[in-house]
Image (cartoon, rainbow, N blue to C red):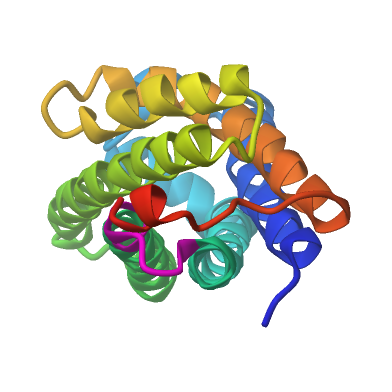
């Protein structure tokens, strides 16, 4: 059985991995000539990646391992807290789908984007169109994963509130954060909001979970066990 300290650390890791994208997108990419308005433009992005594959490989690898750790942490939290709670069980399913989809998304990108960048730099006329199609597919997968992830964030927050396992501010912040994340596929503009709020909540929630290893863990009373 994993300890809550280990589980909390895993949640902090995935939150930090997502937060690490901020300086990458806001500092490293502009320094390489890729601006915010250049998303999906193969004639800008692919030459930059061809010159320096680490611009894509680095962040994608970070997210791949970060989400793999997150999946383990989410499953471990259910094992530690879930018991017979239908609410936490259903939320955990959403969390595993979220982590899995994002990991698959990054794994596909790792296999195809650097190769397309090299083909584009070599004069392949079809590489740009393939990149556009791939980007659209990966973006759709990512948003679908966010829907499932939002259900986990909101569900685990409600469970934690009812069990009294985290401070109510953290719990209610999770409910709001989860609903916004789940709404990403419907209102893609909310992706920017989630990008700023989700990592912070994961880190704070992870710390709160880790601290329960030296204190009281949620009691699985009959009323809570029914979710």
At x 75% / y 70%, what residue is drawn? 3
Write the residue at 61% across / 52% down.
Answer: 14
- The reply to whether the magenta stretch includes residue 88 is yes
Residue 219 shows up from this direction? yes
In the image, residue 68 sits, relative to residue 98, either above or below, namely below
Horizontal side of 75 relative to 180 (left or right) equals right
Indicate yes or no whether the magenta region holds residue 140: no
| Residue 36 spot, x, y in % from top left | 43, 21
Res. 29 in view = no
Q: Quadrant of residue 1?
A: bottom right
- Residue 215's place in the image compared with 10, above or below, is above
Residue placed most toward the observer, 101 or 138: 101
- Residue at 63% over, 40% down: 165
- Quadrant of the image occupied by residue 115: bottom left
**Residue 92 rendering spot, x and y as whole percentages:** 37, 61
Residue 114 in percent (x, y) is at 44, 66
Q: How many marks?
A: 0
Image position, residue 94 (x, y; %): 29, 57
Q: In the image, which residues are magenta?
A: 82-89
């Amino acid at each position: 059985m994993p300890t809550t300290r280990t589980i909390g650390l895993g949640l902090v890791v995935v939150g930090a991995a997502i937060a690490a994208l901020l300086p990458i997108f806001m500092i490293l990419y502009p320094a390489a000539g890729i601006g915010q308005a250049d998303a999906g433009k193969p004639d800008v992005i692919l030459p930059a990646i061809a010159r320096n594959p680490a611009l894509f490989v680095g962040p994608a690898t970070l997210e791949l391992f970060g989400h793999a750790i997150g999946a383990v942490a989410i499953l471990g939290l259910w094992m530690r807290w879930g018991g017979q709670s239908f609410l936490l069980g259903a939320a955990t399913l959403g969390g595993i789908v979220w982590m899995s989809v994002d990991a698959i998304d990054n794994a596909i990108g790792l296999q195809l984007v650097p190769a397309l960048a090299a083909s584009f730099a070599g004069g392949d006329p079809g590489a740009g169109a393939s990149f556009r199609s791939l980007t659209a597919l990966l973006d759709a997968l990512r948003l679908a994963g966010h829907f499932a992830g939002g259900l986990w964030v909101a569900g685990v927050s409600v469970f934690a509130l009812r069990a009294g396992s985290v401070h109510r501010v953290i719990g209610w912040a999770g409910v709001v954060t989860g609903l916004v994340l789940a709404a990403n596929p419907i209102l893609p503009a909310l992706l920017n909001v989630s990008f700023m709020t989700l990592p912070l909540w994961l880190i704070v929630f992870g710390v709160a979970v880790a601290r329960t290893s030296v204190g009281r863990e949620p009691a699985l009373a009959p009323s809570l066990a029914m979710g």
